[in-house]
Image (cartoon, rainbow, N blue to C red):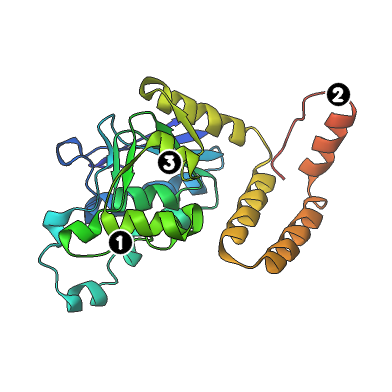
């Protein structure tokens, strides 16, 4: 596929997507989000890819949604076109692990896109925020929902109601970010993490991702039941037999992804 607003490559078993709209600080317009949907779907369907990294530039992961594009929309237009739902949720539906590698600004839709990924790795330059109230609207791509589940009600309320940004160190402290790296090392470290994930059994990784995602969306009792059944299901795979046998024999496992 060809893309105008993305750079897409594979590095071994890792798919790397770079948002590439530098003059607009990677503002998330309709075309970019449509291209991103196609790119993640293609990598998700590629058997040679085990994990995906989405990143931006040193200045901005994504500075937000494209306000110039949306400012004149009417209610009838956004409701009738299923705005955001139609083009923005593709990342959250990918079965393979997706890592957001965030440097610079991740504001509004940029922060929401990062939260759609399975984990966020941040440069020490990263800035996160949901500043929608400052321009007369509210977060619309999960900012009030995903953020609250990750950082708790009080912190989410503060970020959403004041529009203030937080830095990478605070984002890591409150659990929004998994790890922080020097900006120059961010993409390499994100790819290294993705390579490690991709080295394990693909079916088992998919089950693990699904189980953790269930915890994010359901009750503890339902989640434990779901986890237990998936755990039982791993014993039907060749890779479970290989992994445990390799451990017992003190050798490296040779996973066949089945």
Q: Nearer the viewer, residue 187 or 46?
A: 187
Which residue: 19% across, 35% down? 22
Contact between labelled residues 3 and 1, with CB atoms less than 8 Å apart: no
The kind of secondary structure element at disc 1 is: loop
Mark 1: few/some/many CA within 10 Å (<14, 14-19, 20+): some
Q: Sequence order check: which comes first, mark 1 or mark 3?
A: 1
Q: Which residue was labeled with disc 3?
A: 171
Which residue: 51% across, 38% down? 178
Q: Looking at the picture, how far across and down is residue 93, in whole percent?
A: 48, 58
Whole-Å distance between the Cαs marked 2 and 3? 39 Å
Assign the C terminus to one quadrant of the image: top right
Mark 3: few/some/many CA within 10 Å (<14, 14-19, 20+): many
Q: Which residue was labeled with disc 1?
A: 139
Mark 2: few/some/many CA within 10 Å (<14, 14-19, 20+): few
Whole-Å distance between the Cαs marked 1 and 3? 18 Å
Q: Is residue 33 above or below residue 248?
A: below
Which residue: 43% across, 53% down? 116
On the image, which quarter does residue 100 sit in? top left
Assign the N terminus to one quadrant of the image: top left
On the image, which quarter does residue 3 sit in? top left
Q: Which mark is residue 250?
A: 2
The kind of secondary structure element at disc 2 is: loop
The mark closer to the camera, 1 or 3, is 3
The mark closer to the camera, 1 or 2, is 1
Which residue: 83% across, 51% down? 235
The kind of secondary structure element at disc 3 is: helix
Contact between labelled residues 3 and 2, with CB atoms less than 8 Å apart: no
């Amino acid at each position: 596929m060809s893309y105008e607003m993305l750079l897409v490559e594979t590095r071994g078993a890792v798919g790397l997507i770079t948002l590439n709209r530098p003059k607009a600080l990677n503002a998330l317009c309709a075309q970019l989000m449509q291209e991103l949907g196609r790119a993640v779907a293609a990598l998700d369907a590629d058997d040679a890819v085990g994990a995906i990294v989405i990143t931006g530039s040193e200045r901005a992961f994504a500075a937000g949604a494209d306000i110039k594009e949306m400012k004149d929309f009417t209610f009838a237009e956004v409701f009738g076109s299923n705005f955001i739902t139609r083009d923005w949720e593709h990342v959250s539906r990918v079965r393979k692990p997706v890592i957001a590698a965030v440097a610079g600004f991740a504001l509004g839709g940029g922060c929401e896109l990062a939260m759609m990924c399975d984990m966020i790795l941040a440069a020490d330059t990263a800035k996160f925020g949901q500043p929608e109230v400052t321009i007369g609207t509210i977060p619309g791509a999960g900012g009030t929902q995903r953020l609250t589940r990750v950082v708790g009600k009080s912190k989410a309320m503060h970020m959403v109601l004041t529009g203030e940004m937080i830095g990478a160190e605070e984002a890591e402290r409150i659990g929004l970010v998994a790890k922080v790296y020097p900006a120059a090392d961010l993409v390499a470290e994100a790819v290294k993490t993705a390579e490690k994930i991709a080295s394990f059994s693909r079916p088992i990784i998919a089950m693990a991702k699904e189980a953790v995602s269930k915890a994010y969306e359901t009750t503890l009792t339902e989640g434990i039941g779901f986890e237990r059944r998936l755990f039982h299901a791993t014993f039907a795979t060749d890779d479970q037999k290989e992994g445990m046998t390799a451990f017992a024999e003190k050798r490296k496992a040779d996973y066949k992804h089945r």
